[in-house]
Amino acid sequence: KGAPTTPLTSIATTKIVERVLRRNSLPGGLSSLICGGSDIGSSISKDKRIPLVSFTGSTQVGKQVALTVQSRFGKTILELGGNNAIIIMNDADLTLAIPAVFFAAVGTAGQRCTTARRLIVQEGIYDEVLTRLRHAYEQIESRIGEPFEKNVLYGPLHTKQSVELYEKALEQVKQNGGKIIYGGQIYKQRKGNFVQPTIVTQLKHDSSIVHQETFAPILYVFKCKTFEEAVQWNNEVDQGLSSSIFTNNPEYLFKWIGPNGSDCGIVNVNIPTSGAEIGGAFGGEKHTGGGRESGSDAWKQYMRRSTCTINYSKELPLAQGIQFT
């Protein structure tokens, strides 16, 4: 079941899967599609004939899915929200870091679960990063338009409601003392749900609007003093999907990927937060749900695990060699 606002995309994807199945001598109907609203999703969650429900969506809806499926002792794979941060340390290679932040924050108009929502920059390079990042954002103005057109990098938001959420978030930014240093406008002259990619500074790292995932191209930027402070800020949000650090310091690198580093399911070094490779387990911790998709072991979540023991002898061996005679 796809989102009710994207039935054509769901149908197109289902047809691609069907072609692949038939090409490999498998019935196309192994993968089927149901289009509809929340009533369909609710029916799937409640149906005892469905042993496992894999859900990708918001944390709020994911909680309801988890509770409903668990009430009948079914299983779930949850891939929910993300409030992803990129950390840039003083020793980082900015020729890598700036394009990475730009892609992670602006790509797909900020509508990926792995989109960079927060940027934490060590104080020694903070001003330079902001200057270079703002320059990168300025280049997008001539690349906005219909995503199917050549040379377009930045398209519209998904729905009118998304535009309203973008606008509401920026109102909260202003109320909390934040400063919009780039963007913040709705392209009302354009047909469609187009908004400016936006950079916000001067908010507290733990303010409520920062800890809320807004599915729009808004990047909150913060200045940190130390590596430890940056890691703490990365981990303080409820979600735990994707994270990234830019550094050439081996000590920072191994602390970051270790038990006292990032608490996310995806922990990157010198690459952005967004994007996924089929070979890597995709998913996150905390309010992101804990589920994993793709990767070498993902198929195991769709299986029923049974321990099978067959006795081929004429004797009756008991567990742990117990004698019961």
Image (cartoon, rainbow, N blue to C red):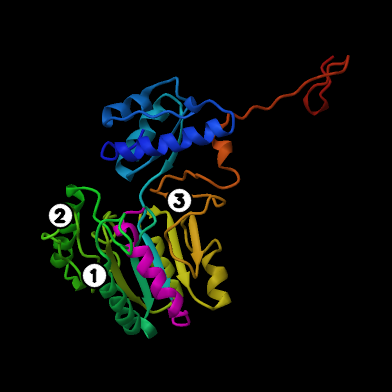
Q: Is residue 310 visible?
A: yes
In the visual, does 198 lie left or right of 52? left
Quarter of the view holding residue 13: top left
Q: Give the range drawn in magenta.
A: 89-112
Which label belongs to residue 191?
Answer: 2
Magenta-colored stretch includes residue 178 = no
View extreme (left): residue = 189
Instruction: State if disc 1 and disc 2 touch (CB < 8 Å).
Output: no
Which label belongs to residue 284?
Answer: 3
- Amino acid type at mark 3: Gly
View extreme (front): residue = 150
Which is more N-terminal, label 1 or label 2?
A: 1
- Amino acid type at mark 2: Lys
x and y percent of residue 19 in the render?
A: 49, 34
Whole-angstrom CA distance, mark 3 to mark 1, is 33 Å
Q: Of the residues tagged 3 and 1, which is closer to the observer?
A: 1
In the visual, does 287 lie left or right of 215? right
Which label belongs to residue 150?
Answer: none
x and y percent of residue 225 in the render?
A: 39, 79
Residue at numbered disc 1: 141
Q: In which quarter of the image is the C terminus?
A: top right
Q: Is mark 1 on a helix, strand or loop?
A: helix
49 in relation to 194, above or below: above
Instruction: State if disc 1 and disc 3 touch (CB < 8 Å).
Output: no
Magenta-colored stretch includes residue 97 = yes
- Amino acid type at mark 1: Glu
